[in-house]
Image (cartoon, rainbow, N blue to C red):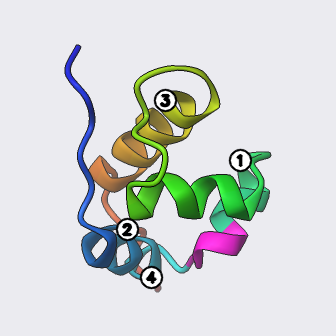
Amino acid sequence: MSTLQFNPNNVKHNLRKHGHTMTSWAAANNFRFRDVSDVVRGIRHGNYGKGREIAEKLAEFSEQQPEQAA
């Protein structure tokens, strides 16, 4: 599997579409905000360990469709 690449603005936009901030998404997935922020900004490349786990969850999350309000 290749390294997952993120555009920080796209990640934040997808989170907002789903009603999350990076802080709320990190808390909901039992990650520290700083770790999530580092992955999104490219400080952690997501090749292995916690960074990879965050990158994979973000990729999975961004593929989901936002729930429509009634």
Sooner in the amino-acid sequence: mark 3 or mark 2: 3
- Mark 1 and mark 4: Cα distance apart in space: 16 Å
Extent of the magenta region: 20-24
Q: Name the residue under label 4.
A: 16
Q: Mark 1 points at which residue?
A: 29
- Type of residue at label 1? Asn
Q: What element carries label 3?
A: helix
- Residue at (34%, 43%) from the top-left corner? 59
Q: Where is residue 38 in the image (x, y as percent from the top left)?
A: 54, 57
Sooner in the amino-acid sequence: mark 1 or mark 4: 4
Please tell me whether residue 21 belongs to the stretch shown in magenta.
yes
Q: Where is residue 33 in the image (x, y as percent from the top left)?
A: 71, 63
Q: Mark 3 points at which residue?
A: 52
Sooner in the amino-acid sequence: mark 2 or mark 1: 1
Q: Is mark 4 on a helix, strand or loop?
A: helix
State the mark number for residue 66.
Answer: 2
Q: How crowded is mark 4: few (under 14 residues within 10 Å), some or many (20 or more)?
A: few
Q: Main secondary structure of the magenta part?
A: helix
- Residue at (28%, 48%) from the top-left corner? 63
